[in-house]
Image (cartoon, rainbow, N blue to C red):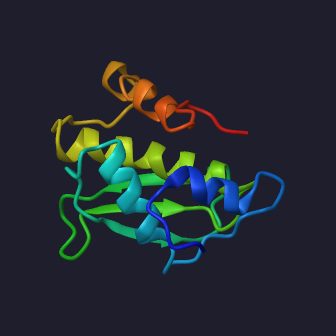
Amino acid sequence: MPRTKSLATLIQYYGSERVYKPKANKIPAIYKILNREIFNNRLKTPYIKIRRIRGALGLFEFNPYATKHCYRITLHNKFKNFQEFVEILGHEMVHYYQKLVLKQNSAKHNKEFYSFRKRFSKMGLELKRIYR
């Protein structure tokens, strides 16, 4: 992974032809870039888990009764390419923003969710409800 703070450089480095398998030690750097560029560093770092998920590429989970991790982002262990991985991570971060900053009861695909489309497109990313 190149030593950069630019998401465009990372997307170019990994390319769009290769399958991307995220590693737990690489995710915080990408999370920081997205947090800085899209969310103005307003998000805390949640617990991020990588595992195989059936029927989804990512999940945002909120458990108010949890003692350790109230907020959790779960990501699939295999993506079509690096850009898809970044888009899914960003998608789940929008849900996290809805819950943490906007204090919405349900972090759904509503008007506030889609208000982030312009910020995503400035970075060359797509924000949509269904991927693949």
Residue found at the very far bottom of the displayed protein: 25
Instruction: Kindly tell me whether residue 68 is visible in this rendering.
Output: yes
- At x 50% / y 38%, what residue is drawn? 123
Q: Is residue 12 left or right of residue 124?
A: right
Q: Is residue 120 left or right of residue 112?
A: right
Total tally of numbered discs in the picture: 0
Q: Nearer the viewer, residue 38 or 60?
A: 38
Q: Is residue 9 above or below residue 102?
A: below
Instruction: Kindly tell me whether residue 109 is visible in this rendering.
Output: no
Measured as percent of width and height from the top left, residue 75 is found at: 54, 61
Residue found at the very far right of the displayed protein: 17
- At x 23% / y 54%, what residue is drawn? 43
Residue found at the very far top of the displayed protein: 111
Measured as percent of width and height from the top left, residue 120 is found at: 47, 34
Q: Is residue 88 above or below residue 53?
A: above
Q: Residue 51: which quarter of the image?
A: bottom right
Q: Is residue 61 left or right of residue 9?
A: left
Q: Quadrant of the C terminus?
A: top right
Q: Is residue 22 left or right of residue 116?
A: right
- At x 22% / y 61%, what residue is drawn? 44
Measured as percent of width and height from the top left, residue 66 is found at: 22, 69
Q: Residue 116: which quarter of the image?
A: top left
Q: Nearer the viewer, residue 37 or 69?
A: 37
Measured as percent of width and height from the top left, residue 110 is found at: 37, 22
Q: Quadrant of the N terminus?
A: bottom right
- At x 78% / y 62%, what residue is drawn? 19
